[in-house]
Image (spheres, rainbow, N blue to C red):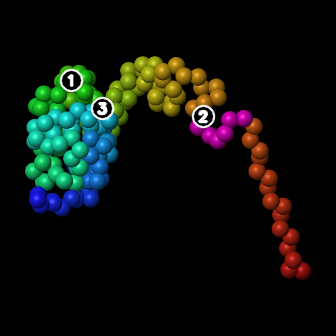
Amino acid sequence: MAERKYMESIIRILGTDIDGAKTIDNSLRGIKGIDHRFAGIISKKFLKENNLPANTKAGDLDKGQVEKLEDIIINPKAHELPAWTMNRQRDYETGEDKHNTMNDLDFSLRNDNQRLAEIKSYRGLRKTWGLTVRGQKTRSTHRKGGAVGVSKKDTKAAPKKDNTK
C-alpha cells in the first residue's frame, strides 16, 4: 500500500496564499492576473512535464514542484506556451509577448492609462474622468452616487430644548 503524503492546506506562489485543497488549475485562479483559461493551460503543461494525474491537489506538491510551477507562470515563453495565452501581447515599450501578474499587472495598466491620457486620446480622457469607454449608456447607469431617481432629503433634527431653567 502506498504511503500517504502530508498535504499542505495553504501554499505560497508568487507572494499569494493558495488553497491547497483545490486542484492546481482552480487554485491558480487566486493569483491576480491568472484567469481560468491561463490557469488551465499552465496546469496541463505542468502536469504533463511532471507526469502527475489531472486531479492533483495543489497541497500535494513539494517545494521543487512549486518552484517549477512558478517558473511556468513567470516565463511562459520559455515553456513554449502560445502568445495568445499571455495578457501582455506586443508590449508597447518592449514589443515582446509576456504575462504580468500581481503588482506588475497593476503597474503596466496604470502606465497604459497614463500614456493614453497624456496623448489626449478619447479612451484616455474618458478613463481619467471615470466615465465609460466602450459606448455604454450613462444616463441611468454608471453613476457615482446612490440610487437612480429621486432621493429624500435628510430631515434635520429639531433643536433640543434647554431644560436647565
Write the start and end of the magenta stretch as one range.
Answer: 143-149
Q: Is residue 44 left or right of residue 161?
A: left
Q: Quadrant of residue 87?
A: top left
Going by the numbered disc 1, the residue's amino acid type is: Ala
Give the vertical position of 102 relative to 37 (above or below). below
Q: Is residue 80 left or right of residue 120?
A: left
Q: Which residue is mark 3?
A: 37
Q: Is residue 107 left or right of residue 149?
A: left
Task: State the residue at coordinates (52%, 28%).
Answer: 131
Q: In terms of sequence position, does the residue under pointer 3 or pointer 1 come before the other?
A: 3
Q: Residues within 10 Å of mark 3 (few under 14, many from 20)?
A: few
Q: Is residue 144 magenta?
A: yes
Q: Residues within 10 Å of mark 1 (few under 14, many from 20)?
A: some
Q: Is residue 65 left or right of residue 115?
A: left
Question: How far from the left and from the top, in percent, is residue 137?
Answer: 59, 22
Residue ranking furthest to the bottom: 165
Q: Is residue 102 magenta?
A: no
Q: Which residue is mark 2?
A: 143
Q: Which numbered mark, 2 or 1, is in the foreground of this view?
A: 1
From mark 2 to mark 1, how far is it between C-alphas? Answer: 37 Å
Query: What's the mark number on residue 83?
Result: 1
